[in-house]
Image: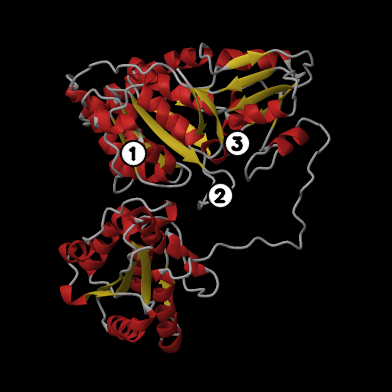
Amino acid sequence: MNKQLLLGDEALAQGALDAGLAGVYAYPGTPSTEITEYIQLAPEQQARRIHSRWSANEKTAMEAALGMSFAGKRAMVCMKHVGMNVAADCFVNAAITGARGGLIVVAADDPGMHSSQNEQDSRFYGDFAMIPMFEPSNQQEVYDMAYHAFGFSEQMGEPVLMRLVTRLAHSRAGVERREPQEAPALGVEDDARRFVLLPGIARRRYRALLDLQAALVKASEDSPYNRYIDGEDKSMGIVACGIGYNYVMENYPDGRCPYPVLKIGQYPLPLAQLRRLAEECRSILVVEDGQPFVEKQLRGYLAQGIDVKGRMEGSLPYDGELTPDLVREALGMASQRKFDTPAVVEMRPPALCEGCGHRDMYAILTKVLRESYPEHRVFGDIGCYTLGAGAPFHAIHSCVDMGASITMAKGASDAGVYPAVAVIGDSTFTHSGMTGLLDCVNEDADVTIVISDNETTAMTGGQDSAGTGRLESICTGIGVDPAHVRVVVPLKKNYEEMEQVLREELEYHGVSVIIPRRECIQTLARKKRNNK
């Protein structure tokens, strides 16, 4: 049809739209956010009434997408890699129930931890659940895989995991679109018992999933996304996964790699091609962006005596993002790195925006705690306010996962820490903090919880927050005494009031919630520009 310049995220979204997508479910998280945003703004979204509202968290998103699949419609659920941990309960069990309407689960991984707590590789989740996976090497493959994956999901009766990495999700290339297709009219699941995972049914469904594995391997061996490219020099063979294939070929501008290359874009691993590579080559270099998922499997698949190189063996660094330069050196070619950062140059750490309400909240919080409570501990969470860990505030003592601030504060309080303070944002609170608050209420824990409310999901660009306008009612509904749910406006002119409220609640030995509320200055500025 036409060629468009698209981010990897946008190519995936457009491929899904052209494949007859009925609904996308997601919680914003870098580098996956732009997938849902693209669909929200697409002309097809309104014309076809495609569901594209943000979900409260990845678990609810995964469950809603499975429900749409149950109803016979094509659904997609998107998240960053750590969101897979939140969605894992439903994700793993969805492999047992299977899918009816095509179901794509998108995991955008973040090698190098550009904006994440870890480097976990979502391919391990797909392997653990025993479902097919797609890993594109470029933006065109992102589009093509999304376009075809719904049909493949319906054919196999299973969800499909699509894995991107940051560099592919957030870089642009030309993408050739295909003719939009009509999704098949499947109707609501007629054998609903397979979705009722009582042990007797689950055992049968699990056996069916095991029996499907040979067909999934055969599909990988026949897949156009897995290609064996022969080479004259058999001293080494290369297994190049996803974007790793691009990094290999960037070092051969003429397109002629002297070594045999097995390009992998679909899993389970294509065993026939792997055996051929092992039979023809004296050693194998595994090039994959992320953890050594394939390298570990090869050490089990292949016969002893085959030299397998990669991240585990040391030819490539075990941690960090893969680059063409690192691959070049692993190939035994002279390094072309020209811009190594001198040791004297330090990275400038991110900081809260000038005028941000979180700044005013931290200004008073640190003042009160340091003046009057030398044994205090502040448990932080995931969001813009995590930057309170750095200069000039140095205010928080932990940041582990979504919602952990409240439950870690409770555990510390149980251990005798006083005062135990939790700092969490409005979006993170509705994502994963509410259940922790219920634990606090049930045990009347001695904790002070600060829900710093900027009325948006600011860290990922200002998406809707599920709790906007509802935080007080949520807290009192969970059981917090309304007298100890306090709202303040974090502005310098209100510092005296904020300090008084904070001191009162720190002295209250029970569950108290303080909500400093002021709209994010970035979303406010955006609204003003739009109004002009």
**Nearest the eye: 116 or 185:** 185
- Neighbor class of circle 3 (other Cα within 10 Å; few <14, some 14-19, many 20+) is many
Locate residue 494: give its quadrant: bottom left
Which quadrant does the C terminus fall into? bottom left
Of label 1 and label 2, which has the lower sequence position? 1
Q: Which residue is mark 3?
A: 289
- Quadrant placement of the N terminus: top left
Q: Nearer the viewer, mark 3 or mark 1?
A: 1
Q: Is residue 315 visible?
A: no
Rendered view: 496 above or below 342: below
Residue 28 in the image: state x and y as whole percent: 39, 47
The residues tagged by marks 1 and 2 sit, at their Cα atoms, a distance apart of 27 Å
Q: How far from the left and from the top, in percent, is residue 62?
A: 31, 38
Q: What element does badge 2 sit on?
A: loop
Disc 2 residue type (three-letter): Met
Please tell me whether residue 383 is drawn above or below residue 45 in the rendered image. Answer: below
Q: Is residue 464 above or below residue 500?
A: above
**CB under 8 Å between discs 2 and 3:** no
Residue at numbered disc 2: 113
The color scheme shown is: secondary structure
Residue 177 falls left or right of residue 305: left
Q: Quadrant of residue 156?
A: top left
Q: CA distance from mark 3 to mark 1?
A: 29 Å
The Cα atoms of the two marked residues, 2 and 3, are separated by 12 Å
For residue 40, the mark is 1
Query: SS class of the residue under badge 1?
Result: helix
- State the residue in front, 142 or 300: 142
The disc at residue 282 is none
